[in-house]
Image (cartoon, helix red, strand yellow):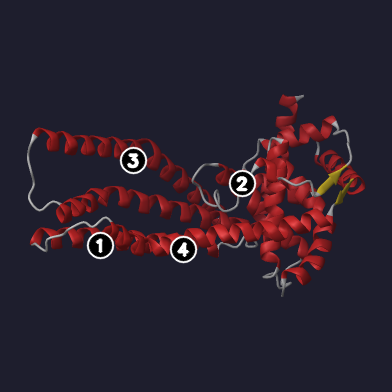
């Protein structure tokens, strides 16, 4: 197939498209006006939920009537939990703002690179979140349990929590996150190479 | 600018350039459902960025950029929990036939050409589509962000690749 031949096929195709297609402007107009509104509402709900997270948490604590005794355990637990909660909260907001900044009218290479880097950022934060999650859980236990009780039931309970957590981490790191990371790094390297050429 | 006074000029531009969207969405998808879904996505992304379009590039350059970027991100969107999945997805029953196409037979050469294009990488696909649409090397370079010299070299390589692919597919 020679280039001239390809171009000929394409020109004919182009002509066919303009001869045989037309737009139903009314339907398109309705779709364009209604869909962004739906999407915007969804974005607002999601953003609102993220921003309201701390208030929801405080309300849950108030309504479940959990009693805390203000001991050293409680303060250690509170600082562990709050520190990790705040970091996660900031990451969520930042990720959301970065997504909104992507403008598809930019040059293809820069958009491709930007999206790959954003995905990498998301994976990186997920990885750190997974690794720090046990400390947040430990923080909750410190706040709720003042004196650890060691009996068969509590040991089985904690054992199960730890096993499930380790299995989930193993799967996520070994098969999912590392593979995605490798692909994204390769994609970014290819784009950088293309930009240099 | 309100939505209503934006929509009329936008629709005229969209109508004039609908061919670009049809051709690109066909090259980046394999089923008719995905094609319609992608066309809706492109229409939405164009509409979204229309207010920001200040005319510092040709209208066709802007349309090509948005259409190609949306198409390249389409596969990502399809993966669960990836960027834009939740905020930009269309359910099957939401796909609205705003494009009225008369039944037309697709020539076997065109099918073959699309099959060959389908085997190319995302970037090469974009380059050959832009080239077949009659864009100059300068324009392709502006749309993709690849240097002008590299565009020329790549077109020659893609041409060879398509030639070889066509031989194996016949």
Residue B159 lies, in percent from the top left, at 73, 40
- Where, quadrant-wise, is the N terminus of chain B in this rendering? bottom right
The dot on residue A173 is: 3
- Whether discs 3 and 2 lie on one chain: the answer is no
| Circle nearer the N terminus (3, 4) | 4
Badge 1 vs badge 2, beta-carbon distance below 8 Å: no
Q: Residue at x 8, y 62 (%)?
A: A72
Horizontal arrangement in the rendering, residue B88 relative to residue A45 (left or right): right
Q: What residue is shown with label 2? A: B74
Between the residue at mark 3 and the residue at mark 4, the CA separation in whole angstroms equals: 30 Å
Q: Whole-Å distance between the Cαs marked 4 and 2?
A: 27 Å
**Callout 3 and callout 1 share a chain:** yes
Element on which disc 3 rests:
helix
Q: Secondary structure at mark 4?
A: helix
Foreground disc of the pair 3, 1: 1
Task: Judge by depth and name the residue closer to the eye, A110 or A58.
Answer: A58
* Badges 3 and 4, same chain: yes
Q: Taking B13 as reference, is A44 left or right?
A: left
Q: Are marks 4 and 1 on the same chain?
A: yes
Q: Are marks 1 and 2 on the same chain?
A: no
Q: Residue at x 17, y 56 (%)?
A: A143
Q: Is residue B114 above or below residue A14?
A: above
Which residue position is annotated with label 1? A82
Tell me the CA gap for discs 1 and 2.
38 Å
Which is in the foreground here, disc 4 or disc 2?
4
User: Can you identify the residue that label 4 sits on?
Assistant: A48
**N-term-proximal mark, 4 vs 1:** 4
């Amino acid at each position: 197939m020679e280039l001239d031949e390809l171009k000929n096929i394409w020109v004919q195709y182009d002509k066919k498209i303009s001869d045989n297609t037309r737009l139903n402007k009314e339907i398109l107009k309705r779709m364009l006006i209604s869909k962004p509104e739906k999407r915007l509402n969804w974005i607002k709900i999601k953003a609102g939920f993220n921003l309201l997270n701390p208030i929801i948490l405080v309300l849950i604590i108030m309504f479940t009537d959990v009693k805390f005794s203000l001991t050293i355990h409680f303060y250690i637990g509170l600082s562990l939990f709050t520190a990790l909660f705040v970091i996660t909260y900031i990451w969520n907001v930042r990720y959301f703002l970065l997504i909104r900044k992507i403008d598809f009218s930019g040059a293809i290479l820069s958009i491709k690179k930007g999206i790959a880097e954003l995905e990498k950022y998301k994976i990186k934060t997920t990885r750190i979140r997974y690794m720090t999650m046990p400390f947040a859980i430990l923080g909750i236990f410190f706040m709720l349990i003042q004196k650890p009780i060691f009996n068969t039931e509590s040991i089985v309970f904690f054992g199960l929590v730890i096993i499930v957590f380790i299995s989930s981490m193993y799967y996520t790191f070994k098969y999912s996150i590392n593979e995605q990371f490798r692909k994204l790094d390769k994609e970014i390297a290819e784009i950088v190479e293309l930009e240099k050429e | 600018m309100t939505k209503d006074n934006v929509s009329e000029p936008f629709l005229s531009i969209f109508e004039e350039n609908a061919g670009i969207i049809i051709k690109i969405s066909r090259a980046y998808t394999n089923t008719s459902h995905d094609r319609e879904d992608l066309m809706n996505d492109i229409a939405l992304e164009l509409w979204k960025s229309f207010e920001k379009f200040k005319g510092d590039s040709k209208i066709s350059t802007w349309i090509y950029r948005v259409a190609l970027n949306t198409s390249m991100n389409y596969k990502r969107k399809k993966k669960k929990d990836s960027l834009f999945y939740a905020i930009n997805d269309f359910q099957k029953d939401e796909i609205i036939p705003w494009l009225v196409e008369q039944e037309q037979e697709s020539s076997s050469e065109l099918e073959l050409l699309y099959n060959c294009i389908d085997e190319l990488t995302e970037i090469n696909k974009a380059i050959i589509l832009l080239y077949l649409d009659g864009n100059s090397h300068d324009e392709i370079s502006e749309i993709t962000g690849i240097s002008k010299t590299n565009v020329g070299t790549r077109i020659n390589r893609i041409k060879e690749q398509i030639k070889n692919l066509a031989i194996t597919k016949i």
